[in-house]
Image (cartoon, helix red, strand yellow):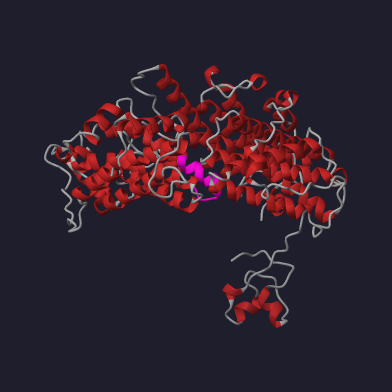
Amino acid sequence: MSDKKSKKACEVCKRRKKRCSGGRPCDYCIKIDKQLACTYRVKVSSKTVKVTEKYLVNLKSKIKDLELQLATRSNCHPNDVSTNDNPLVSSEDDEEDRDGMDDPSEGNNYYRLGNSACGKFLLRIKDSLGKSCQLRGDVRPSVIETISLETSPNMALIEQIVRENCPSPSEAKNWILAASNVIGADYMYIEPDYEKSVLDELIWTSDSHNADFVKYATEVTRFFTYLALGCLFNKDRSPEKTRSKFPGLQYFETALRLQSELLKVYDMMANTSLVQSFLYVAYYALSLDKPEFAYLTIGSAIRMVFTLNYHKKTTTFTENRVFWLCFVYDRLVSVRFGFPLMINELDIDVSLLNEPTISSQETLIDSCHFNWQVKLANIITQTLRKIYTRNSFSFIHNCYTVLKELKYWLDSLPNDLKVDMDNFSTKQPRSTINLHINYNYTIIITTRPVFLYVFNKVADSEQKAEELFPKKLLNTITTLLESSVQAAQIQSFILTKLYFEGRMVSTSFLDCHYIFNATIILIFAAFCQSRPNYAIFFGCDINTLFERVQVNLRVLQSISQYNIAACNFNKQLTEIIELISSTNVHIPQEHPFPNPSVGKESDAQLAVPPLDPGIDLDLARKFDLSRILHDIGDNSSELFPFDNEDFLKYSFF
């Protein structure tokens, strides 16, 4: 007990309104045997600590730097995150000492399991016991038994399907070559010896019934997906018996029939060829404007590579290339349709390999193209996570970070893969042009949320933009809006030039989707610029925007007769223009938006191609990420009202 007395009454005396002696415990609490309840409430004076705004900015900046370092380290070295601290995650040295313990050639399925699997944990216990007792040679993985299904693929049926649908060798080679020329370096892979080892020895041989069933069945499935894609990209189209309006549909349906037959015994059939067939079916499905089906089939391909353990270890270049193809396809559909990502970078332990034996200069360039597409897909991942997902950073900081990565990507491109906008030519390899189209697309989706933010803020307040935003913030907003509009203009120029010179793939989903993406920005920019209280200049006059929008719509309308996706995109764009132009939108406009005539043109009008307005070369030269990063760099750590809830409220639904 303490002899020190308090000048205040204890809680018991306060409640019972008794005179408190101030002891610890007090006399009254001792008397009623409540010594433990005798407590004194200590009054804590409320103090407000004042700090300067500079201190908060510096503190926030340090936190961002630390989080950025952590994120960079996680992305660059995913294996270093927990290996040293977690005894359940083996290092590379441990793997080398296993002496084939997880060798798939031994018929062991445990090599496919992750470290959280109970079977894998049991295997490690056996391994440790074997080491400690020096019984290494006697400890072997258990042989896993499975129940054989009564249902099995029908070899005779598969051969019949091939006989009924297989084209002549010359036609097949032409279609496969057409697909390879357009997307072979981006979204497809054909082995250098494919013609000899697969076409000659498996597909067209009369001795196919003696071939390995798994190899034959999966290769013919992949073969028909190549044919379907080749018909999409072949100008001569395909002489199909039925439904010939859309090329390759017969081969697409044939591939689906073969896949359904093989999936009856998936555990026997999973290999790189079957994985590829699902990816190419997905690409074709996009051209049918079936994004949900494409996402489903890409997901099936990704889960196949997971069960094959290609995300952890690949033994051949083909396995490595197929895994990274899945990665590119995952990002392709996720960013365009808002689906969740299916491959997490932290789960990947394999690096992107280069072609081991380069048979020609063309093969070398194709391999280089694909590597840069994968790097761009990594940046798209950052766009999804930093721009379209809630996080601790401000939008300006995130936007600056992604644009900086894009600039580094562009600056690091080999000279053979660069495009000179001063002297743009569609005679360059289509894969090179695809890289820059995808680059512009990434800039647009990174910066476009600013449009909705500014528009909704201005519409809600009915004030002018310069009155609504502080000067520094307005400058940053203007820079981001300019970059989005300029990227959309350059994108439109590239794509329409491809169309005018016959290099656009009229039946492909991606080309018309890129036009759709750019046109949305141009329409909204023209509409915003027509509002008297918007007062933000996008680096071009409104008539230029109108002209570019009309050309884009004419191109979409022209290819709509071949492409259902283009037809749907054209319809959506026409509807938004009609909405903007209608009297129901009670917004004063200095320049009325022209009511679109597209969508109502005759076949004779569509036969006449629209005029190419070209592009302002000064605009192309001015569109420089170095200048954009410089303009927003000083403001990326400012405490703007642009941050957090305010931006999320106005820029997304």
* Residue 428, picture quadrant: top right
> Percent position (x, y) of residue 584?
80, 60
Q: Is residue 182 left or right of residue 127?
A: right
Q: Residue furthest front?
A: 604
Q: Position of residue 353 (x, y in %)?
A: 39, 27
Q: Could one spot residue 516 in this view of the protein?
A: no
Which one is nearer the viewer's eye here, 114 or 527? 527
Question: Which region is colored magenta?
Answer: 329-341
Depth order, front residue of 450/366? 366
Visible in this render: residue 433?
yes
Q: Up-down: is 126 above or below 181?
A: below
Q: Position of residue 230 (x, y in %)?
A: 41, 36
Left or right: residue 343 compared with residue 212: right
Q: Is residue 266 above or below residue 415?
A: below
Count of picture labels: 0
In the image, is residue 212 part of the stretch drawn in magenta?
no
Q: Residue at x 68, y 67 (%)?
A: 41
Residue 485 placement, left or right of 94: right
Q: Quadrant of the N terminus?
A: bottom right
Magenta stretch: dominant secondary structure: helix
